[in-house]
Amino acid sequence: MTAKNRGLVAITGANGFIGYACVVHALQANYRVRCIVRREDAFAAIESGLSVQQYLHHLDFAVVPDNAAENSYDDALAGAKYVVHIAGAVPLPHLHPDDQIYYPFIRSTKNMISAAEKSGTVKRIVFTQAGAGLIDSEVGDTYGKEMKGVLDEHVEVNQAALTYKPPLKSPHQAYCASKSQCMTYLNDLQRSKKLPFDIVQVIPGTVIGPSEFVTTRSQALEHIDRQTKALLFDGMAPRYAFGFVHVQDCARIHIEALNEQKVKSKNIPPWFVAAATSEEGVNGEQMWAKTADVIEQEFEQEIKEGVFKVGRSKTPVNMPYRVDSGFTESTLLHGETMRGLEECVREVANWYLRLKLDDE
């Protein structure tokens, strides 16, 4: 099947960690790709990626400086058959909860729907969501590590988070509120069958993996996710964990969800779960300890040399869900299982060891 036959997919946040992986997977799956970025130089970085070199003739870009501005995506979606919407604000402490997190999320989501309607060509949009939409930001760190809830295709958004409106107390509250409200809004739209396109939502776990743009170990330390940094370098204990997924598995799920033959409109679930299934009966501390055991066994010499320092005690503070991604794997991955925490961290460790020291 040729690239022309698969059609054009527009990917927002295409220069990000998940976004770039989605660009690569889409090109490999014979789609043409339009990278939607905030600045033109971001596309230049994408073009330099080793994995896209043989596909440059199937790659173009659109610049959307402010995705919360009215009509922001209209030109970017012109002629697109599919969209993967990943771009969004990270809830950093210095951001204004209302103006820089909540409203941008709400407006960019609605702008995307509006632009897709105007395009007359879009058939399906895949939205990246987050486990933050499943929790109440105001209960504090009381969820524990027992993973008693089940994160699957029918998990419910947090009902309290649906009620939070500006003025919001914190970036964390704004993030949880905007995610839960956007997730519900999009589910309602999909169920209404009023739109000329499908809406698919994906909830990823912590996304783990190497980056081909990183060349030194110091760069890697800036890139590595908090969970892996805690395990390999005794970094700060992450506040939340909603499962774990390799970046390539996460990207594959996003792109496979575009396939209208594989996932027919009538069979679209509330969400696909991009995270490896958790072993039943194992809590967060046990899962973390098992991975720490693997690191200590396989990288004994590097630990002795001080390259790694295992954060055995740095289990995430809140691990409320056991992941069950069986439906996602059977529907989108031909039954293949996603890589879990142990495999992902092992790969990142080996990648890190291959990188240059900064003085080399």
Image: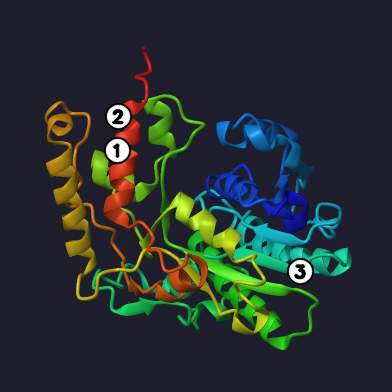
Q: SS of the residue at dot 1?
A: helix
Residue position marked by numbered label 1 in the rendering: 349
| Amino acid carrying mark 1 in the image | Ala
Name the one closer to the observer, 188 or 58: 58
| Amino acid carrying mark 3 in the image | Lys
Q: Residues at badges 2 and 1 in contact (C-beta under 8 Å)?
A: yes
Between disc 3 and disc 2, whose residue precedes? 3
Mark 2 and mark 1: span between their CA atoms? 6 Å
Residue at x 16% of width, y 40% of height: 298
| Amino acid carrying mark 2 in the image | Leu
Q: Specify the label residue 353 is tagged with.
A: 2
Residue at x 43% of width, y 72% of height: 138
Q: Residues at badges 3 and 2 in contact (C-beta under 8 Å)?
A: no
Q: Specify the label residue 123 is tagged with.
A: 3
Mark 3 and mark 1: span between their CA atoms? 40 Å
Q: SS of the residue at dot 2?
A: helix
Mark 3 and mark 2: span between their CA atoms? 43 Å
Between disc 3 and disc 1, whose residue precedes? 3
Residue at x 33% of width, y 72% of height: 320
Left or right side of 39 for 212? left
Q: x%, y% of residue 118?
A: 88, 66
Q: SS of the residue at dot 3?
A: loop
Residue 328 appears in the rendering: yes
Residue at x 86% of width, y 53% of height: 75
